[in-house]
Amino acid sequence: MAIRNGSAGNSSLLSKFLTSWNVFGIIFRDCSHSRKWAYLVPFRRSRCVLRNAGDRSPDAYRAVCAAVYRMAADRYRDYKLKEHNHLKAHGPSRPYDEMSVEDWQKCIDFFTSPTFVIQRSSKNKANRGKAKYSSVQGLKSFSATRYDEFSGDSPNNDHRFAMYEAQLRQMQREIEILKNRIPIVVPAEKENEGKDEGLEGFGFQKEAESLGINYGQIGNNLPPPDKVHDLLQSLNLKKARIYDTNPQILMSFANSNIEIIVTVENEMLSTLTDPQAAFQWVSTHIKPYFPATKITGIAVGNEVFTGDDTALMAYLVPAMVSIHAAFVRLGLDQYIQVSTPNSLSVLSQSYPPSAGCFRLELNGILRELLQFLATTKAPFWINAYPYFAYKNDPNGVSLDYVLFNSKSGMIDPYTNLHYDNMLYAQVDAVIFAIGKMGFSGLEVGVSETGWPSKGDPDESGATVENAAIYNRNLLRRQVENEGTPLRPNMRLEIYVFALFNEDMKPGQTSERNYGLFQPDGTMAYNVGLDTLPTTSSNPSDSISLDSSGTQVKAIDIFLPLLYYSISHAIIDCLINCAA
């Protein structure tokens, strides 16, 4: 095995290549003339796309995107596949090729982790769903089936580019992190084997479309917003909620695919009941950042109905109406929803779920709120924490039930719906309560839920083990896009609390230990979210953990391999063009 340094010639070539796509004058060409397209191997396909060099074209960018990353994916997938097959054939006792025992152990931890198993099964299921025909006898991948002479479809290059664009932009960010920093371990040249699977060979975590994260900032040691942005990108999380309108965060999240919900603080509600003040607030805090930053929602206040401040409650709906009116004036109402997060204390009864109803004294103002949400088609947000129910009654509440581990669960005697976890029961109780007010079609989402990894002696259940189980099971269900028993076909949108442990939060110890991550970017515990880059001060530290929760520096193996694959795919393309 040869050693190359990331700051050597390949880095400068890579940087130049990514920033000056057209200098090679590669022309993009439609290959629909090829009746045998479906049967061409990836190498031949790339040559068809890139065969005409010397002519400048605006489509050169697309040609390089499709060809380079397909070839890089083939190489990277091949290396990981060989290591995985070696593990299955020879077991963990015999290291692969010339790999050290330490590096081999990292591979074992990676391939035996629950996340890897979920990724593989999810991808297989997704690929079967994409297939145009029920069976292709194992001879053709999805891409080959799509561009098949039998289907009558020729290669649609615009469509192919759209498929690769998101992965390309993610790759460019990763290359910037890797460049000039990581020593590259270059294995001996190996012949590509296996089927063409495009970029799925990179093994990125399957996206949970309805999962978001709450990004709190009550800490004096948190990473800067740009590092948080990179962390969320590496986790493949596409939704976040913040508790203010911090301009640094909004600027750092610009031009990314992360949707963000911002918050109007409770103390601002009285001011924003005035339509002109609300318009000025929107013009100052929202409009300058939209649409570059994907602001999709405004959380007006937080748990306004929890306390006994009746004046604050009275300000809520008028402030929401004024903010929405400002969006209408600016033409933003179709892009940004206005709602408010509520605690479960708005319910007077939640068990069984079908008995759910709101507190009698809140019925008047809640009816106004529900009418506004129904008119603007915004969701009703609820902060739901099964942890609190267990903490308050550890002898009467089943720990398995609140941790999504219960097989028996409970059956609602009035609906016969079966609930295997408390979170879904809490959400359905809110849905029933809303229905009894005459707004049964309203969407309900979970704006906060989580479990603390540490607590005071009187905080039962606040342990690392329970936090890992709760959030891991929640993540698994989100990947499957589950709905509640009452609405099984409507995926439940959930924002996990929280991204980081926040050391300046007041209250009991648990309040400062809800984070999935420590402020230095390392995981507080393993929930199955594997990242590529890291926000740690040490660039060689990875945030991936094995199934036992031990930190694994898998970056030492897989990121250098990724870099190697990309750089050599670029060289291959240049050789092809020259030929």
Image: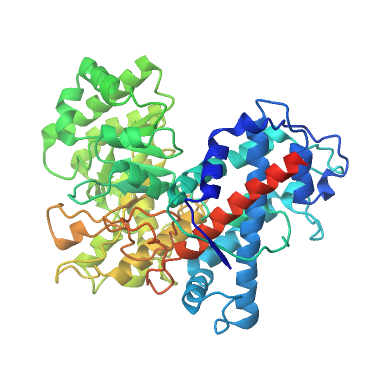
Inspect this view and state whether residue 171 appears: yes
Q: Position of residue 444 (x, y in %)?
A: 39, 43
Q: How many marks?
A: 0
Nearer-the-camera pick, 497 or 386? 497
Where the N terminus falls, by quadrant?
Answer: bottom right
- Which residue is more in the foreground, 349 or 98? 98
Apparent side of residue 352 relative to residue 167 in the rendered image (left or right): left
Quarter where residue 53 is shown? top right
20 over 393 or under it: above or below:
above
Give x and y (percent) for residue 399: 32, 71
The residue sitting at 12% across, 56% down in the picture is: 507
Instruction: Look at the picture and state if 383 lies above or below 122.
Output: above
Give residue 499's position: percent from left, percent from top: 31, 52
Residue 117 picture quarter? bottom right
Q: Nearer the viewer, residue 457 or 228?
A: 228
Q: Is residue 542 left or right of residue 393?
A: right
Left or right of 118? Residue 71 is right
Residue 398 in view of the camera? no
Residue lying at 29% horizontally and 69% vertically, measured from the top left:
464
Q: Position of residue 60 (x, y in %)?
A: 66, 31
Indicate the quadrant where residue 259 lies: top left
* Closer to us: 30 or 573: 573
Establish if 363 lies above or below 171: above
- Quarter the C terminus occupies: top right
Point out the residue furthest to the front here. Answer: 9
